[in-house]
Image (cartoon, rainbow, N blue to C red):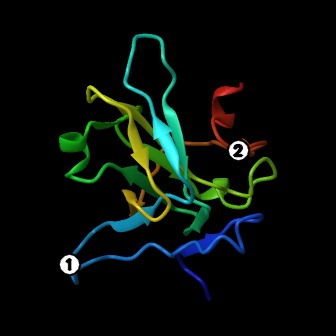
Amino acid sequence: MKQRGFEIIKGYEDKDIHMPVRKTKYSAGYDVEAAEDIVIPVYTPGIKPTLIPTGLKAYCGEDEFFMLVNRSSGPKKGFLMANSIGIVDHDYYGNIDNDGHFYFQYFNCSDHEITVHKGDVIGQVIFQKYYLTDDDHSDGIREGGFGSTDKS
């Protein structure tokens, strides 16, 4: 039985996407690569973050989620995650809008455009469990992909 892991999303099967890996025995995070070349413009007020596609989806247990986190070298290069960390819920996997494709959202805080090349490591995924409060009675059903929980 599958517990947690990564899969290539529909439409990226022939794009030479590499599965995330931990680099050392005690690493918490799985390094994730960019699925295509992307240019991140220099930050200016009002600019939207640049979404970097991974070509991946991830599955985990019903009481788990995964975090998208910046690499420790990211800020030195000018990468600033737009949302500090990304939280991706169990029910995002395989959703009807985008098959569960997760992206990294970055601002560029350097003084020049940054080109991210396909295969560059852009961030890490860390799997985690979460806990419910005694009085939790949530029963909503996900109805979409990226940002869909804000559409209520």
Dot 1 amino acid type = Tyr
User: Callout 1: helix, strand or loop?
Assistant: loop
Which residue in the structure is indicated by mark 2? 145
Q: Where is residue 76 in the image (x, y as percent from the top left)?
A: 18, 42
Q: Where is residue 53 in the image (x, y as percent from the top left)?
A: 57, 51
Q: Neighbour class for label 2 at 10 Å: few (<14), some, many (≥20)?
A: some
**Residue displayed at 71% across by 26% down:** 151
**Residue displayed at 81% across by 52% down:** 96
Which residue in the structure is indicated by mark 1? 26
State the residue lying farthest toward the bottom: 1
**Residue displayed at 47% across by 49% down:** 132
Q: In this view, does 108 lie above or below 98?
A: above
Q: CA–CA distance between discs 1 and 2?
A: 32 Å
Task: State which tag comes first along the sequence, 1 or 2.
Answer: 1
Asked if residue 131 lies left or right of residue 79, the reply is right
Where residue 146 sits, quadrant-wise, is top right
Residue 133 visible (yes or no): no
Q: Position of residue 126 (x, y in %)?
A: 37, 62
User: Callout 2: helix, strand or loop?
Assistant: loop
Q: In this view, does 32 lie above or below 105?
A: below
Where residue 148 sits, quadrant-wise, is top right
Dot 2 amino acid type = Gly
